[in-house]
Amino acid sequence: MKKTGYDATEPGRFPDLIDNQSALRIGEEGADAVKFLLYYDADEGDKINDRKKAFVERVGAESKANNLPFFLELVSYDANMDSVTDAAYAKVKPHKVIELTREFSKPRYNVSVLKLEVPVNQKFVEGFTDGDEPVYTAQEAANYYKEQAEATNLPFIFLSAGVTNEMFLKELHFAKDSGSNFNGVLCGRATWKLGVKPFAAEGEEAGRQWLQTEGKANIERLNKVLAETATPWSNKVKVVD
């Protein structure tokens, strides 16, 4: 239903829909669910955020009316900052992520599954830094993971947000150890982004070879870690036969 990215013609990073799609049409074409991405800054103000909330309400209602599960992917940002990867944003990220988790868990949005960022920038956590000054102690970071999990009663899964496969696996272990009852992942770049280099340098066959070897190994490592860390979604949702 939604185009990649957001509408850059006005402030607010508003979603930009595909003109000829709807939940009804997606269902008619054989889809099993509706997935929607929203960029959200909890502190941007009502003029922008009320529009976004109404937008999600409409998508959720449309999904429910067509008996399709609604997967809502939420990506945080700060409207007054240019970067979401530096230490300055790392300091405010827990608040941003936890608040958007809490808001879109409300029944009015009809969300089935939340797709979320981890609530910290892990490379700024004590014990995970690589030359950077820590922003959080390990205990502070663990508390944020736990607080995020407690902010929702919905099944939620983690996105990788472009970190390396190795770091993503560490995040999942850290989440588990922190008491986060997350239910899985839906990620891309942590598994395939290094395959772009051989594809660009050597062509399609080299790209395919990388996916069939290193890419496959990334998925297998991820599946193994998930078996050790994720909790069943059925713990949160009553399954009716």
Image (cartoon, rainbow, N blue to C red):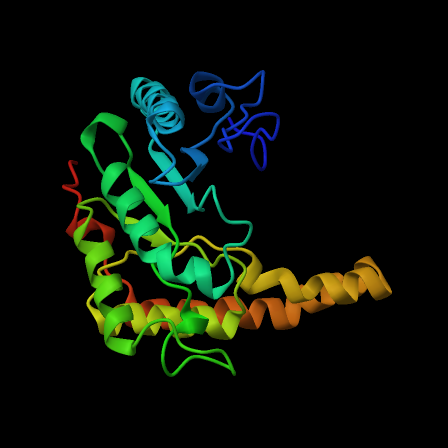
Q: Quadrant of residue 149?
A: bottom left
Q: Is residue 234 left or right of residue 10?
A: left
Frontmost residue, 114 versus 103:
103
Q: Quadrant of residue 181?
A: bottom left
Note whether residue 184 is visible. Answer: no
Measured as percent of width and height from the top left, residue 107 is found at: 19, 30
Q: Which residue does the image show at 17% across and 43% down from the upper left?
A: 237
Q: Quadrant of residue 162?
A: bottom right
Measured as percent of width and height from the top left, residue 43 is found at: 34, 40
Q: In this rendering, is residue 175 above or below 73?
A: below
Q: Which residue does the image show at 69% across and 64% down from the upper left?
A: 195
Measured as percent of width and height from the top left, residue 58 is found at: 35, 19
Frontmost residue, 50 versus 28:
50
Q: Which residue does the image show at 17% across and 45% down from the upper left?
A: 153
Q: Is residue 166 left or right of residue 183?
A: right
Note whether residue 47 is visible. Answer: yes
Q: Which residue does the image show at 43% across and 17% down from the upper left?
A: 24
Measured as percent of width and height from the top left, residue 41 is found at: 39, 41
